[in-house]
Image (spheres, helix red, strand yellow):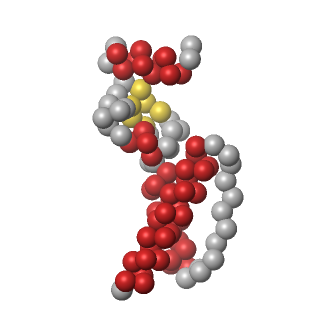
Amino acid sequence: MDSLLRENLLVILLIPQISYASTAPELSDDRRYDFFSRVVPPDSFQAQAMVDIVKLMGWNYVSTVASEGSYGEKGVEAFMQLSREAVHTKLMD
């Protein structure tokens, strides 16, 4: 069965979905995914931990390697965004 059809059917029937591996941040939108839950945190948590490590180690250059697709690409995007915010905050201090 198509995953979109299955998702819509579960929402219509008010059946909760629990994921053991979905980390996409958009799944945190309770208005759109009100019957969805997960047991792992969204990518933004991992990205923040990576930024914290970079700051703690005092690194001023890092490279990322990620797989193609929503998990890898969204994770790198979150890391880059949080990195930019951290640099901007440091410049403002």
Q: Residue 60 location, x and y as percent?
A: 59, 80
Q: Nearer the viewer, residue 9 or 58?
A: 9
**In the picture, residue 36 is in which quadrant?**
top left
**Placement of the N terminus among the 4 image quadrants:** top right
Q: Quadrant of the C terminus?
A: bottom left
Tell me: residue 44, above or below residue 25: below
How many numbered circles does the render carry? 0
Residue at image coords 32%, 18%: 14
Judge by depth and name the residue closer to the eye, 42 or 73. 73
Residue 67 shows in this picture: yes
Residue 22 higher or lower than 60, as above or below: above
Could you tell me residue 85's position as x and y percent?
A: 43, 70
Residue 31 position, x and y percent, is: 30, 35
Q: Is residue 15 visible?
A: no
- Quadrant of the image occupied by residue 39: top left
Relative to 68, is 13 above or below? above
- Measuring from the top left, give residue 71's x and y in whole percent: 58, 45
Relative vertical location of residue 6 with respect to residue 51 in this rendering, above or below? above
Left or right of residue 89: residue 62 = right
Q: Residue at x 37, y 32 (%)?
A: 33
Residue found at x 68% / y 46%: 68
